[in-house]
Image (cartoon, rainbow, N blue to C red):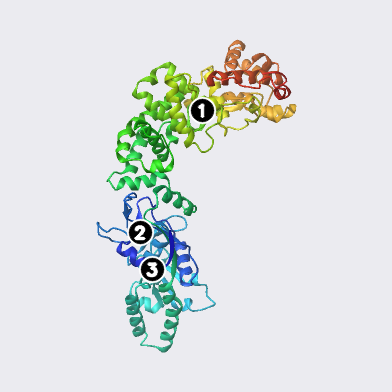
Amino acid sequence: MYTNDESIQELIKYADSGKIQLPDFQRGWVWDDERIKALISSITQNFPVGAAMFLKYGNKNIRFKYHGIEGTVLEEDTIPEALILDGQQRLTSIYQALFCKKPVLTKTVKGQSIKRFYYIDIEKAINPSEDMLEAIISVPENKMRTENFGKDIKLDVSTEEKEFEKKLFPLNKILDFVETQTWQNKYYAYYDYNGEVIRKFTEFSSLVINQVMQYKIPVIYLEKETPKEAVCQVFENVNTGGVPLTVFELVTAIFAMDDFELRKDWDSRYKKYFSSEIIKVVNATDFLTALTLLSTYKNGKTVSAKKKDVLNLSLDDYKKYADCLTKGFNETEKILQEERIFSAEDLPYSSQLIPMAVLCTLLEETHEITNTTVKNKIKQWYWCGVFGELYGGANTTRFVNDVNEVMQWISDDTVIPKTVADSFFSPIRLLSLQTRQSAAYKGIMALILQSHARDFISGREMDFAVYKSENPDIHHIFPKSYCERMEYPREKWNSIVNKTPITYRTNREIGGVAPSVYLNKIEQKGQITQKELNVNISTHMIDVVSMRKDEFDLFFYKRAIAILDAIEQVTGKTVPGRNSDEVVQKFGDEL
């Protein structure tokens, strides 16, 4: 890596000839009209506008598809000497506004697309009391500003003579010495070689034109041998203010060299197979990560999902495994629905979908996924990840361990996956599960639904159909306002132990009164008998007797036991510390 100061005049020539181009992962040009004027103003005053970063092109290990910056017209076989990694918007703005003869396709501050040419007011530019930014103006592509719905012309520079008359210099000539001199000579002739006009333009030429022509930008050059993962990392670091680059963008550019449109393939695949309730959260990078795990496992290589391995994914492997992996993601969703997870919002960890889909893909090939014993192991592994809260950070190492170890566990009960071994849930954790942001919180809600929870009033089991049609939400069993009036501890009444999925209709009946009051009100309306209501309540892991007597502490204690029992059931692991002193202090007895 090295740095060199390059004049924008030379950089624009490089861009125009195709010596510097953009890799296909670079996004489209997005700067608005006001920002372009501010950039031009900074350049005319020799203010720094930041460094650019180029990648020397020609390394056979980095084969990105490329294209010229917007506005250039290049021969199809024009091979770049360098690719722009950082500085696309600035260089495109400079090229289009200060060199290209076509109008600049930009946008207003509100995002409306517009086409503009840029001029600089000669007299304002040399006046030290004027703000240089005020000297920079943009006009529509017909070079006329109008008002009163186009009826009145406010400014007209549609011919050179009108440019001369308004003393507005066209900025798309400023980096071409010959064109600048030609315009200057005609300008002098228009004013019959007036001495004052010549003096002011000479000053303008010295202060502005020469300044722009000599303006330099620091350019950091990355050598040809720079690895792909380093290019990706560098771009992420320098592009924090823009749209982040993903691994998917780089792989798209790599596959494009073999005329494969990865983005088109993914968009079509996503629309057809990933628009359902749960796996709609899977993005393109997730899919490539899973595919890398799958392909390295299938090819007998060291299983991996690190960025560098995803970037080294071959097009052949993508074509070979993409369809079966897609089926694996769909099988994953079916299993999660069996476990009463019905939507992406209720998904404890979206990242856990990646290894789970790989496992389902591998087991689908051998038809083992239809084996109840095998499927139960997948479910046990899944819940250990959720209640161990093991998928909250960097997960690539765990992805690899899970794929390798769960596959071994399928055929050998003595090989316990690390995620299962590491899983640990503390009884005290129930008190800190206060919001639905936590994976364990969402997991417990799924366990309540697994117990065939019914709506209090209608008695309908909250399966997928009810979940879709009635959209139950999580509400307090002992209502918030009631608990506050009774001065119960917030860590108890606002915890997961005092919450359950309830339909909107039922929640309206509850209000802010004691359970005994709202249950009695429901019964008096004749919507359901006491016996039927008791049965429905019990399906939520609720002790009906303590709830009807408004005995909050006893209700809380018994429901905590029921929840911990359910966690033990799905994880296949004992919850330790249920008889600890801290548990007795917090819950009133051993759990």
Residue drawn at the location 46% of the way across and 33% of the way down: 399
Q: Which mark is residue 98?
A: 3
Q: Label 2 neighbourhood size at 10 Å, few (<14), some (14-19), many (20+)?
A: many
Q: Quadrant of the C terminus?
A: top right
* Number of marks in picture: 3
Mark 3 residue type: Leu
Q: Is residue 571 visible?
A: yes
In this rendering, would 48 be left or right of 156?
A: right
Residue drawn at the location 71% of the way across and 18% of the way down: 589
Q: Which mark is residue 418?
A: 1
**Of labels 3 and 1, the one closer to you:** 1
Q: Earlier in the sequence, mark 3 or mark 1?
A: 3
Q: Earlier in the sequence, mark 1 or mark 2?
A: 2
Q: Mark 2: which secondary structure?
A: strand
- The answer for how far apart the CA atoms under marks 3 and 2 are is 22 Å
Residue 82 in the image: state x and y as whole percent: 35, 59
Q: Which mark is residue 82?
A: 2
- 94 vs 237: above or below: below
Q: Label 3 neighbourhood size at 10 Å, few (<14), some (14-19), many (20+)?
A: many
Residue 174 in the image: state x and y as whole percent: 38, 73
- The answer for how far apart the CA atoms under marks 1 and 2 are is 46 Å
- 1 vs 207: above or below: above
Q: Are marks 3 and 2 in contact (CB under 8 Å)?
A: no
Depth order, front residue of 167/212: 212
